[in-house]
Amino acid sequence: MPAQEAGADEEEHLDGLTGPVDGLEEALAAVDAFDHTLTGGLLRPRPAQAEALIALADAVAASPLAARVAEAAEKAAAGAASEDHFVALAAARTALLGSAHDALTARADEVTGRVREEPTAPAAAGQQAPNLLAAARSWLCDLARTGWQGIDHDLVSGAAQVVSAMLPDPELRRLAALLDGFAAELAASCPGAALERIPVRRWADLWARGMLLTLPGAAAAPATDTATGRLLPLGVDLQEHATAAQAQVHAVFEPADGTAPRLVRASVSVPKPDTVLGAGVWQLLRPHLTLLAAAGEGRSMDLTGMPVTAEGDLVWQDEHARPGEPADPFATARVALPTATTAPAAPLDRHPAHLVQPVFLEGYGIEQDGDTITFTLPGHRLAVDTDRIPAAGPLTPQAVAASSACIGLLRWDAGRFRLQPLAVETTVRRKPAAVHAGAWAGGTTDKAGAKAEKAATDAVAVLRERAGRLLRK
């Protein structure tokens, strides 16, 4: 199909994004009700909490989990749940969100015409320390019994010793990182009784994921294959917090053996001083992922034996990559993206928040109401998530509002599909131009970007000097 026809066909079907998804509201309602039981804790459940637990069991009554979850819900409603019962409740919650993820993914695949690859069997897990897994599970169960409103520093600090013992073991590091971050969030919110607002869904997500990762084999390293061929970057998704930053490059991989192209990702995460802002964050990320420079320069990369997981994540190693020819992301989006297949999500990543699909749109209308931008397509209006546009690049909401074509990530957020722009074609100083969120990833001559990079250099140098002085003492 010609590029223009492919883009038009995708746009004509986007009206399917607003239609109801069978069973979605019911599944999410059961999850929400259960999540609120964790607010007050399950040591002495109230009638409303008992009803929510029974509703969770009813929601999975037709699944293989039915008997175990029904027993767990009954015990928890009576305030007598054991660790195995809490594991069963976490599994039921995860299964419901997984079914919601699958339904939404199927809807997005139908709309975009994307073909999804068949899932592969998970890798076998290595030997893990059962005593440490049990200790982590015990702490998480104590949290569930106490509830978010009852947390205090004594309870939260119980994770520290477990995390310290886990970190040296690569097999346990994934769970250790989750527990460490979760405990830090809880500690910053103590005492729970004084909280005005509780992130109910987020903390329940972290709790349930942690519970399942304490099961032997759940935290197994993903199976990997190797990739040889040409990598064509589409855009860079930058996420930045006060103390950490992550860059994820979305790309189309064309295998050297001529098989179908596929969507892949490459990610890097780094700790970040809170004094490093804006474009300065690229200095921290760039040394760990040479692909960022290629993405910023609009260049392909040639891969030879690059490790890649069954979920489409490149385990980036510089020795397996070299810079290739120039590659315009918009040409890639028009020609290669419509035919690219996509990998299935890992079992524990089946969650609506993990739904991310690269898409290409053009020929849309634009509605703007204050800071809210909406793309209008035949029979549909697609909200644009401008809050996700990073400050560390030249892409702005104003450029999006004046665009004629967009490469973006289709996400499910706050009960609806939304589009996160990665790049747009627009008019700059009366000339057509492409503006990319990751344009400064490889460096920049832009005055604002260069100023931020210099400030970051100075800040990092000062911090290193202070750290060296402390170590010498």
Image (spheres, rainbow, N blue to C red):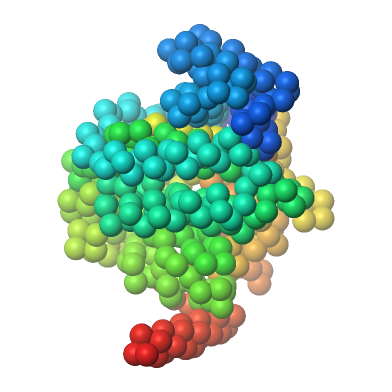
Residue 24 in picture, x, y percent from top left: 62, 22
Q: Is residue 233 left or right of residue 190?
A: left
Residue 333 in picture, x, y percent from top left: 46, 47
Quadrant of the drawing holding the C terminus: bottom left
Which residue is found at the position 53% from the left and 85% from the top? 455
Front-most of residues 351 and 169: 169
Q: Is residue 355 left or right of residue 27?
A: left
Which residue is found at the position 43% from the left and 75% from the top? 283
Which residue is found at the position 42% from the left and 65% from the top? 270
Residue 43 in picture, x, y percent from top left: 61, 31
Residue 40 in picture, x, y percent from top left: 68, 36
Q: Is residue 26 left or right of residue 166?
A: right
Number of marks in picture: 0
Front-most of residues 129 and 104: 129
**63 w.r.t. 421: above or below:** above
The picture quadrant where one finds residue 201 is: top right
**116 w.r.t. 258: above or below:** above
Which residue is found at the position 67% from the left and 33% from the top? 36
**141 w.r.t. 304: above or below:** above
- Asked if one can make out residue 460 in the rendered structure from this viewpoint, the answer is yes
The picture quadrant where one finds residue 289 is: bottom left
Front-most of residues 223 and 130: 130
- Asked if one can make out residue 223 in the rendered structure from this viewpoint, the answer is no
Front-most of residues 239 and 212: 212
Q: Is residue 50 left or right of residue 453?
A: right
Quadrant of the drawing holding the N terminus: top left
**439 w.r.t. 57: above or below:** below
